[in-house]
């Protein structure tokens, strides 16, 4: 049985409509949707009911004392509910293509294009020259053909959809030959064998995990074979005693048997990064140039654009994909196309593209620039955090992320923050909850901030966020 005292105090809780008439709550209603404030009031009253039921200690007896406490909680609850679910994050991890943080940051041109496509009517499927119905796929077709050298193109929702569509169109009910060493799982449960099954194609694995020879492919070809598939090993490398068949050899074998060859590049890219110290990998145009019939790659990995799956290749094969009803289900939207076109246009200016596309700019920053940036960031932090933490700078490594260039370890300089009054785990927790949220790396009881992925105009907001997180309760 509940204590009489608790029952009395429960009755003492103000009703919802009385709280809604409190001036501070009325201000909230003026600034936010009423339903949101009412829900917050109910939530807070529920909390107080529970508190009182489990013990009246610390619960004021008089309603006049209780109301301000409730109103303060309602204000905090309304603010929490009013925050968008998709929020801005300062990425201090140094992982440039951080899939969990939204992968590529768009170029300014792409951001403007999205704004127009979002705010206005567009010629998405309307041919302005003829006044007749047009195709959304034609908007970026010329650019893609020009940049990759392919005959035809098709853009879908993401690269997983591109692979599914290509396999389903070219090989449903038939066999696809893939090297065992290429049966990759990309994050978020994209596994080549599963996508293959979903497409209706039958997987024929050849070779061993570490070695696949051309004769393995040759020996697996039957009258049921529809396609030879090459998959970029994206997020891992098999090292040591290894062999994979090169694309040229695979293409020659395909020609010999009249079989198309497809390459899922994963993170396809249009500019070579080897001159910046990254491991050499073939570009999309080199892959097309090698005679590969169908190439698929992501829009938001190294390309640095919006989430999209790009298919380029032989016209006859791409046209078949366009007629597949699945294409409608994995259709790309107008804002994506706007951002993709603008991103591709950046590549028409090779001397500016590394500057204009944030992904490429971050990946090609040299260590000296990063050292200067780290010193500047450390300076801003020291002047803002005065006494709240010990700030240092040391050499470290960044990551490409997004399953691209997994063995690359680009050098950087990290700003380290050792909090004085709070544990580092508590600090990162508070930083995630802050506005803007900040995500960094924890190493040896310190928070490490990599300037590679932090824009210069984020230094001050980052310092302020750190100050608030370090001050809370301490
Ligand atoms: C990343 C990746 C995919 C999936 O691409 P999304 O654009 O994320 O759908 C498919 N294949 C490979 C090899 C990849 O690296």
Image (cartoon, helix red, strand yellow):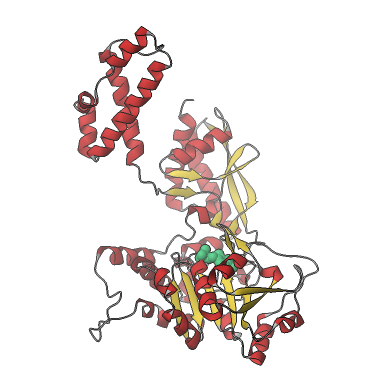
Q: Position of residue 321 (x, y in %)?
A: 46, 80
Q: Nearer the viewer, residue 58 or 174?
A: 174
Residue sitting at x 60%, y 51%: 413
Q: Nearer the viewer, residue 145 or 275?
A: 145
Q: Given the current orientation, which residue lies at the most extreme right position? A: 241
Can residue 270 be seen here? Answer: no
Q: Position of residue 47 (x, y in %)?
A: 37, 25
Q: Image quarter for residue 403? A: bottom right
Tally of marks: 0
Q: Position of residue 64 (x, y in %)?
A: 25, 14
Does 334 sit above or below residue 382?
below
Relative to 99, is 243 on the left or the right? right
Q: Nearer the viewer, residue 414 or 404?
A: 404
Q: Position of residue 246 (x, y in %)?
A: 69, 79
Residue sitting at x 68%, y 87%: 253
Can residue 369 be seen here? Answer: yes
Q: Given the current orientation, which residue lies at the most extreme top position? A: 4
Relative to 244, is 449 on the left or the right? left
Residue sitting at x 49%, y 59%: 103
Quadrant of the displayed image that contains ligand 1:
bottom right
The quadrant of the rendering that contains the N terminus is top left
């Amino acid at each position: 049985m509940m204590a009489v005292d608790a029952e009395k105090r429960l009755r003492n809780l103000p009703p919802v409509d009385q709280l809604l008439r409190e001036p501070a709550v009325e201000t909230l209603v003026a600034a936010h949707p009423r339903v949101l404030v009412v829900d917050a009031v109910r939530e807070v009253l529920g909390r107080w009911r529970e508190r009182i039921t489990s013990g009246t200690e610390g619960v004021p007896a008089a309603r006049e004392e209780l109301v301000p406490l409730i109103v303060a909680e309602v204000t905090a609850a309304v603010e929490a509910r009013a925050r968008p679910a998709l929020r801005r994050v300062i990425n201090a991890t140094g992982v440039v293509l951080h899939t969990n943080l939204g992968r590529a940051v768009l170029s300014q041109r792409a951001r403007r294009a999205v704004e127009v496509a979002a705010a206005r009517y567009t010629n998405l499927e309307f041919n302005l020259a003829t006044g007749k119905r047009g195709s959304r796929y034609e908007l970026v077709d010329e650019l893609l053909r020009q940049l990759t050298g392919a005959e035809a193109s098709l853009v879908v929702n993401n690269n997983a959809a591109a692979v599914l569509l290509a396999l389903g169109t070219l090989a449903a009910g038939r066999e696809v030959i893939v090297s065992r060493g290429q049966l990759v799982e990309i994050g978020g449960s994209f596994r080549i064998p599963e996508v293959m099954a979903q497409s209706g194609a039958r997987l024929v694995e050849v070779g061993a995990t570490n070695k696949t020879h051309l004769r393995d492919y040759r020996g697996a070809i039957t009258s049921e074979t529809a396609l030879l598939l090459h998959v970029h090993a994206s997020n891992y490398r098999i090292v040591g005693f290894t062999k994979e068949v090169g694309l040229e050899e695979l293409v020659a074998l395909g020609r010999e048997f009249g079989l198309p060859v497809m390459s899922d590049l994963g993170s396809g890219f249009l500019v070579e990064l080897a001159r910046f110290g990254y491991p050499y990998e073939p570009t999309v145009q080199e892959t097309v140039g090698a005679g590969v019939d169908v190439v698929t790659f992501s829009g938001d990995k190294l390309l640095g654009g919006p989430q999209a799956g790009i298919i380029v290749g032989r016209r006859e094969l791409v046209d078949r994909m366009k007629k597949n009803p699945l294409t409608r289900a994995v259709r790309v939207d107008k804002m994506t196309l706007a951002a993709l076109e603008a991103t591709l246009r950046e590549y028409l200016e090779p001397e500016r593209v590394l500057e204009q596309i944030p992904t490429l700019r971050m990946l090609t920053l040299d260590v000296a620039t990063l050292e200067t940036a780290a010193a500047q960031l450390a300076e801003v932090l020291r002047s803002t955090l005065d006494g709240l933490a010990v700030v240092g700078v040391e050499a470290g490594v960044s990551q490409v992320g997004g399953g691209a260039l997994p063995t690359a370890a680009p050098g950087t300089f990290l700003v380290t923050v050792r909090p004085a009054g709070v544990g580092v785990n508590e600090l990162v927790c508070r930083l995630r909850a802050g506005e803007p949220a900040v995500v960094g790396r924890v190493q040896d009881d310190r928070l490490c901030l990599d300037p590679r992925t932090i824009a210069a105009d984020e230094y001050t907001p980052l310092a302020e966020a750190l100050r608030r997180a370090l001050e809370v309760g301490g």
